[in-house]
């Protein structure tokens, strides 16, 4: 083969040649140097982080005739034969195509024999998670008690698929994603060895799209070399990989967030004419919005280290966009990018995402975003002052947000939530017109009730400096029809309330009359009682006292008999 891919040409040959896996290389170096290495290893991690390469270097190191502090010398017969793939004692097996129990049985039979010409026989099983359950069971005993001259190295990208019985018999090492600095350093070294002039920003852009996998980044750079022609620039990388570029992404999103949907669609058309892939456009937009959102939570130095690029010169143009809107935009574009694979018309998917983000903007203003930001920064100093007279309608967005904050501060959370679901469609000297989505019809109906309007009206007058009537309609319905329905509902509600009010008034008046009657009756009763008492007192004064009757002496029995019997009583007594 006349040309060898860069990732194969520059595959690591010793432990010091690995990028971004310092902990693992130091551990393996020490084990080889001291002769304390185990009989079974498990290397796990995402693709392109050096698992298989590390296994091959480790196999060379344990069989090297003249190791240098645990590192293979690279010049002995064992190292040369292993590098050329001619060693009979280093067996590399692809479990994706040899995943049956018969393949493992054959491996077990061969593992019983001594090495052909090396100190150890090393079996490297790549993508081991593809083995069947029976194959894993057949491998268990061999892994637990292998021959003294056999070493197994298993590599996988899906650690969760490995049975626990296998994991417990292995010494595990997790390969992490390659950091941006280590990846850029490795790419720069390859460029120097290839004699290619490069820009550091170009290498950073390649490493960013490598996703932490060094092999992917080297493959992308190999592709860019054909476009660079000996001079690797940012422009060459963007053209080669079909990247949108942050300037174009900024131009597209700025038109979108300023309410200029026509301009955003036109910019998208120009980008697609340049041959950019729609999937890459989604990736660029998501990456840019992610950077803008994180820039509000991290300082510049930490952000560059975390993201690999800077958004310092762009973030001022997005200061007026709230975090909730950025999160919503990220959700919309992320959901659309996931639907892209099943879409029959990918361009329509992207256009619908742009329209959806534009429709969720709280207000559309013709004022330039930069001017709005400047005005808001100036007014923020005088935020607590009440506007004197009519306000400038060009600053309606600021006052609308102030109204929402005031409602939240006054604990009118429900009304604030209703208004947050609406879009200010139009505002004039006499009224505010809101538009609700079809899914927010309940919010609109609840907001237009009298009790809510009674709370809102004084606050609107205070914030906007004038009395403004509030109108709301559902998107897709006629505003006039909605207004008439609102008036009818309000009239019906008033009609329902009138009889209730009248009944309450009548009952109150009847209760008062009854109380008056009772009080009058009590007064009359008290008067009569007083008159009766006066009469009784007069009679008591005029009444003549009666003499007390004298008590007659009690008649004795003898006297009574005398009185009754006369003369015979004496005889009776004597007898």
Image (spheres, rainbow, N blue to C red):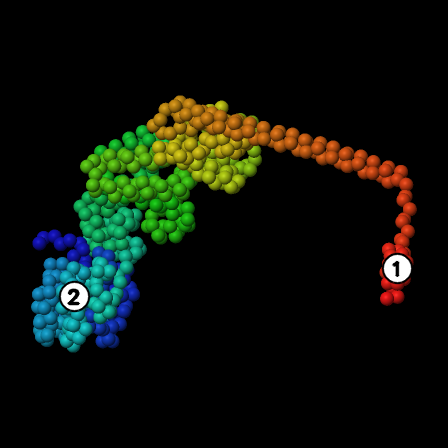
Callout 2 secondary element: helix
Q: Residue 568 carries which label?
A: 1
Indicate the position of residue 352 as horizontal and vertical percent values: 28, 35
From the viewer's perspective, tell me whether residue 186 is left or right of residue 106.
right
Q: Residue 544 carries which label?
A: none
How packed mark 1 is, by other alpha carbons closer than 10 Å (few <14, some 14-19, many 20 or more), is few
Which residue was labeled with disc 2?
136
Name the foreground residue: 443 vs 281.
443
Q: Measuring 19% from the left and 65% from the top, which residue is drawn there?
A: 154
Quarter assignment of residue 234: top left
Quadrant containing the N terminus in the rendered view? bottom left
Name the foreground residue: 427 vs 291.
427
Name the foreground residue: 208 vs 449.
449
Q: Is residue 149 above or below residue 132?
A: below
Residue 487 in sight: yes
Question: First in sequence: mark 2 or mark 1?
Answer: 2
Quadrant containing the C terminus in the rendered view? bottom right
Q: In this view, does 429 lie above or below 437?
A: above
Q: Is residue 217 above or below residue 400?
A: below
Indicate the position of residue 572 as horizontal and vertical percent values: 86, 63
Q: Measuring 16% from the left and 67% from the top, which residue is drawn there?
A: 137
Q: Measuring 9% from the left and 68% from the top, which residue is drawn there?
A: 105
Q: Measuring 8% from the left and 65% from the top, which residue is drawn there?
A: 102
Count of numbered marks: 2
């Amino acid at each position: 083969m006349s040309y060898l891919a860069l990732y194969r040409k520059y595959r690591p040959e010793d432990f010091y040649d690995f990028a971004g896996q310092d902990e693992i290389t130091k551990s393996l170096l020490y084990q080889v140097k001291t002769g304390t290495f185990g009989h079974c290893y498990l290397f796990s991690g995402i693709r392109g982080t050096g698992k298989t390469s590390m296994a091959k270097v480790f196999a060379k190191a344990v069989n090297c005739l003249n190791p240098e502090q645990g590192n293979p010398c690279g010049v002995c017969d064992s190292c040369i034969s292993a590098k050329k793939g001619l060693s009979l004692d280093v067996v590399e097996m692809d479990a994706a195509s040899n995943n049956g129990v018969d393949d493992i049985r054959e491996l077990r039979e061969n593992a019983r024999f001594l090495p052909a010409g090396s100190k150890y026989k090393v079996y490297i099983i790549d993508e081991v998670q593809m083995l069947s359950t029976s194959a894993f069971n057949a491998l268990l005993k061999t892994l637990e008690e292998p021959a003294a001259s056999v070493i197994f190295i298993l590599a996988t990208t899906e650690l969760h698929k490995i049975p626990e019985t296998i994991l417990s018999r292995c010494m595990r090492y997790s390969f992490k994603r390659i950091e941006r600095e280590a990846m850029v350093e490795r790419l720069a070294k390859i460029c120097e060895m290839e004699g290619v002039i490069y820009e550091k920003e170009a290498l950073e852009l390649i490493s960013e799209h490598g996703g932490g996998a060094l092999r992917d980044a080297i493959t992308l750079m190999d592709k860019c070399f054909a476009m660079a022609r000996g001079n690797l620039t940012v422009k060459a990388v963007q053209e080669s990989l079909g990247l949108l570029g942050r300037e174009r992404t900024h131009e597209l999103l700025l038109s979108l967030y300023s309410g200029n949907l026509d301009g955003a669609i036109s910019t998208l058309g120009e980008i697609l004419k340049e041959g950019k892939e729609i999937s890459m456009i989604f990736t660029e937009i998501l990456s840019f919005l992610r950077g803008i959102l994180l820039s509000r939570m991290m300082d510049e130095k930490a952000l560059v280290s975390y993201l690999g690029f800077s958004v310092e010169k762009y973030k001022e143009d997005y200061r007026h966009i709230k975090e909730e809107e950025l999160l919503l935009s990220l959700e919309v574009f992320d959901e659309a990018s996931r639907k892209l694979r099943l879409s029959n018309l990918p361009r329509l998917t992207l256009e619908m995402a742009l329209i959806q983000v534009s429709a969720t903007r709280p207000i559309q203003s013709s004022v330039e975003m930069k001017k709005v930001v400047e005005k808001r920064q100036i007014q923020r100093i005088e935020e607590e002052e009440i506007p004197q007279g009519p306000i400038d309608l060009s600053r309606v967005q600021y006052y609308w947000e102030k109204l929402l904050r005031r409602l939240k501060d006054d604990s009118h959370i429900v009304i604030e939530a209703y208004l947050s679901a609406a879009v200010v469609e139009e505002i004039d000297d006499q009224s505010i017109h809101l538009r609700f989505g079809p899914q927010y019809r309940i919010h609109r109906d609840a907001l237009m009730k009298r009790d809510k309007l009674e709370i809102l009206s004084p606050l609107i007058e205070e914030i906007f400096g004038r009395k403004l009537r509030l109108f709301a309609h559902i998107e897709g319905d006629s505003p006039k029809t909605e207004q008439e329905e609102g008036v009818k509902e309000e009239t019906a509600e008033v009609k329902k309330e009138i009889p209730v009010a009248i009944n309450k008034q009548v009952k109150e008046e009847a209760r008062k009359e009854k109380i008056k009657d009772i009080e009058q009756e009590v007064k009359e009763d008290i008067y009569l009682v007083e008159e009766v008492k006066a009469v009784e007192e007069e009679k008591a004064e005029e009444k003549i006292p009666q003499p007390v009757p004298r008590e007659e002496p009690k008649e004795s029995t003898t006297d009574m008999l005398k009185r009754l019997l006369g003369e015979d009583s004496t005889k009776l007594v004597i007898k």
